[in-house]
Amino acid sequence: MSDALLEVEDLRVAFAVGGREIRAVDGIGYTVEPGRTLAIIGESGSGKTVGCRAIMGLLPTGTAISGSARLRGTEMIGLSDSELRKHRGQDMAMVFQDPARSLNPTMRVGVQVTEAIQTHRKVSKKEAYDQAVELLRLVRIPVPDRRFHEYPHQLSGGMRQRIMIAMALACRPKLLIADEATTALDVTTQAQIMELMLELQQELDMGLILISHDLGLAASYADDVVVMYAGKIVEQAPAKTLFGTGGTVKMRYTRALLDAIPHLERPAHTQLPVVSGRPPDPANLPPGCSFAPRCPSAADDCRQTMPALVEHAAGHRWACWHPCENGVHA
Amino acid sequence: MAAQLPNVQLATPAPPPLPSLVNARRLRNQRLSRALRLWVPAGILIFILALCFLWPLVYKLPSPTNGNILYNNEPPFSPGHLLGTNVQGVDEFSDIVYGGQVSFEISVAVTLIGIAIGCTLGVTAGYLGGWLDAVISRIFDILIAFPALVLALVISVGLGPSEPHLILALSVFGIPTLGRVSRAITLSLRSLPFMTAARLAGTSRWRVIVRHILPNIMPVIVTFSLLGIGIIIILEGALDFLGYGIQAPEASWGNMIAAGQQIMTAQPEFIIIPSIALLITVVSLNMLGDALRERWGVV
Amino acid sequence: MALVQQIQLQSGGPGARLMGARRVTGSPALRMVGRRLLAAIPVLIGVTFLTFAVMSILPNDTARTILGLNASPSAVAALNHTLGLDQPFWVQYWHWLDNAVHGNLGTSLEGLSVSHELATRVPTTLLLLAYALVVSTLLAIIMATLAARRPNGIMDRISLAVSMLSLSIAPYAFALLLIIVFSVKLGWFPVLSGPVTGVGSFFRNLTLPAASIGAGLFAIYTRILRADLVDQMTREDYIVTAKAKGVEPWRVLIKHALRNSSYTLITVIGLNLGALVGAAAIIETIFQVQGIGNDLLTGVSDHDLPLIEGITLVFALITVLGNLLADLAYAVLDPRIRYGSSTS
């Protein structure tokens, strides 16, 4: 526990919108170790992105953040922006969802990479150039010295994402957060980028956080999984505990997410079990369990009291009054 | 079998309060300042309009054209002359009031003509497209390529300076400006799904224009027009200033400034007073336009 | 043409050499320039024709003005015939156009060659316009950047107030106020403009006129640039990326947001050139700057058709070319347009 890379405890984030307070993240906690991959899974609006952006300090001013997030022992929450800036890009880095919009369209991609380098290191322009080309090579971009001078719109989606990764890794951060990094890409490219990130993780001994709505991604690539719903963690376990043979998923929600993944083995024309309803309005959360309105086995105690996240089994936490038994609906 | 862990909480305790976010006072201040930005300029404008058009009906003001030379150069706050009198004995205050009447009459008339003709042409061009659009846009382009001043000047000099002629001259500037804006919005609206839906539903073209396009154009046109009135007041003042608009001794702010130019070294107040009147009016118009833009969410 | 050389130079630059940017003949920028130039011609013709038409239709009595009120009708008729004023205006226009294309802009009523008159006075007007444009753009960039750094902060509120005032004041009133303060009371500048012979006289004579014109421009540019900057900083994803890299806020604002907002600014500058030209005429009169704006006003009152036509042509040219240059700058500077789409 002591040489954990990132320790998050009771993180809360709230916004003021139209005079009301919206709790985007309501008390989450997890740990990331170097060399391991954590997947944070949830629907849009579950707070998965907001939590990580809060740690990085990328939320707009006027957001209330409380709790603790210690990166290698140093507390990130509560730091001023100028202090956080020293860590951003250097100790922790982020790769974003849509590389077409996340890259400056009027700046050459190579320069955007050297900017990442020169923000934290005092190196000459030539050295920065060399390092950048090396980084481009690292992310498997062919002919890196030529690509350096191109503009984002001249590259394909997969290449742009590689540039984003190169920028993120410029100063060899210990923690890499991939916020829906592959969502905007086609399936083949998705696999390539994921493989790339995992290889780099091993090479650089980084901790990797994968934020996604795709449970399948978590199943394939993650070591630990955190499932979020309406700002809270509802299930938390190592991936092996949840997926594959012998896996036990306790939360209805997680179960539903798993069931919604199409499988080739299913007989043709079977209806895809879809979670009915919509994610709750964060300004109007129901009392009791947030998932109750959509849960097939919701009972009265579910609707009245919010279950706490408790480690009911070794390494496996969930927050449910009536969890699934043996992977089957109760 | 679940391992027994100490201190098992089964229900989540009430969440602790976050550092104060929803600052009620700040919110109130924001709303207050937004309201002020709308109503203060509106109030000033209403006051000025009332002063220029209603006050002379209530209180007999000295003539702005024929001054009593015996009482010239009276300082401000003299009895009967709130702002003093000028070189020819004309009362400054009534000069301002009647000058204001002219400015508003002309600028509002020009704007209304611009809306009536310009918007009609613009919406037609935008909605119907094709060669009609090409012709109308080309006409707008030519009129706009004209420095506003030149054409207005030529017309006013040619026809002879008078209020209706000025209105005509300035309309040549007003119509294409409003026309281009209407056309642009119509074009952007036309591609929206709800327009296609209306057409598919068989709504007649006329109904589409009246019920869908016009309501959406209104906010932009109103805010633009407010800014436009300000611009036209300044432009009209420019023509008066040059001597090609309202001729002295008729009252107009531009005239007053031109007259003041003669004696600006010795008595700068004769420039300053009408300039301030102009400034306050145009600032109020611009602020009102901005505030409405903010409230209606116009780009 | 200098333009072509510039494009070629761009194509030969280090980035382009490596990337193999389009050759000049196929350059979309050059094609667009050509298209716009062609489109500009009907506009120029339209403007000059319209001026001719309006001036001819409106009641005027040029010959009598020249000869004096007591001239005999036959003398007036003879002069009308000599000047070609008894022909229908479209015929007159055609003659003018025909001459103009050959470089002959005719003679003004005072007997001076219009081309000569323009040639001597256009540079002064251009200098004045350039002065106003450059200074107001620079100040606007500075003010907008300071304002956008902290939206709704002090600088932002000041910039909004200042630009609101600048926008609302009439240029001629402002000019006179400037004269009162800076020429009469402080004596820093002359009341009337003398000729511009060198750097010193340039600043001494043209500063107040340029300030009068530039105030309104400064206001428009500041407002639009500030709005765009704030938009970029709050809504664009690439700004978040830059922040995530740890780039410090000023650099994010200037190297990322400002760079992208400048395209909007260029367009706005181009679009507002028409208004610029009109204001210049009045200001020139007030300060007695020896430019074409001044000439225009005397020409209109004298009903000096050739002179007015020539000046209108120049004004329209400035407007049209200005727009064109703005579009061109956009095409050349914006890499999304310059370097087409993906090569991979």
Image (cartoon, grey):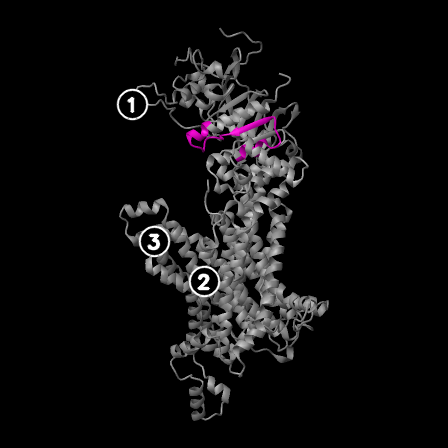
Q: Amino acid at mark 1?
A: His
Q: Secondary structure at mark 2?
A: helix
Circle 1 SS class: loop
The answer to whether dots 1 and 2 both sit on one chain is no
Q: Amino acid at mark 2?
A: Leu
Q: CA distance from mark 3 to mark 2?
A: 38 Å
Marks 1 and 2 close (CB-CB < 8 Å): no
Residue at 73%, 67% (x, y): give it: C186
Label 2 chain ID:
C
The chain under label 3 reads: B
- On the same chain: label 3 and label 2? no
Q: Residue C281: give x, y in percent of width and height.
A: 56, 70
Q: Is residue B38 visible?
A: no
Where is A221 relative to C266, above or below?
above
Which disc number belongs to residue B210? 3
Q: Is residue A159 above or below residue B65?
A: above
Image quarter for residue B16? top right
Image disc number at residue C37: 2
Mark 1, mark 2: which one is toward the viewer?
2
B100 part of magenta stretch: no
Residue that label 1 marks:
A269
Specify the amino acid type for callout 3: Val
Instruction: Give the residues in magenta.
Output: A163-191
Secondary structure of the residue carrying tag 3 is: helix
Residue C79 shown left or right of residue A9 in the figure: left
Give percent across and percent down for residue C244.
Answer: 58, 35
Label 1 resides on the chain identified as A
- C2 or B47: nearer the viewer: C2
Q: Is residue C65 visible?
A: yes
Q: Mark 2 Cα within 10 Å, few/some/many (few <14, many 20+)?
A: some
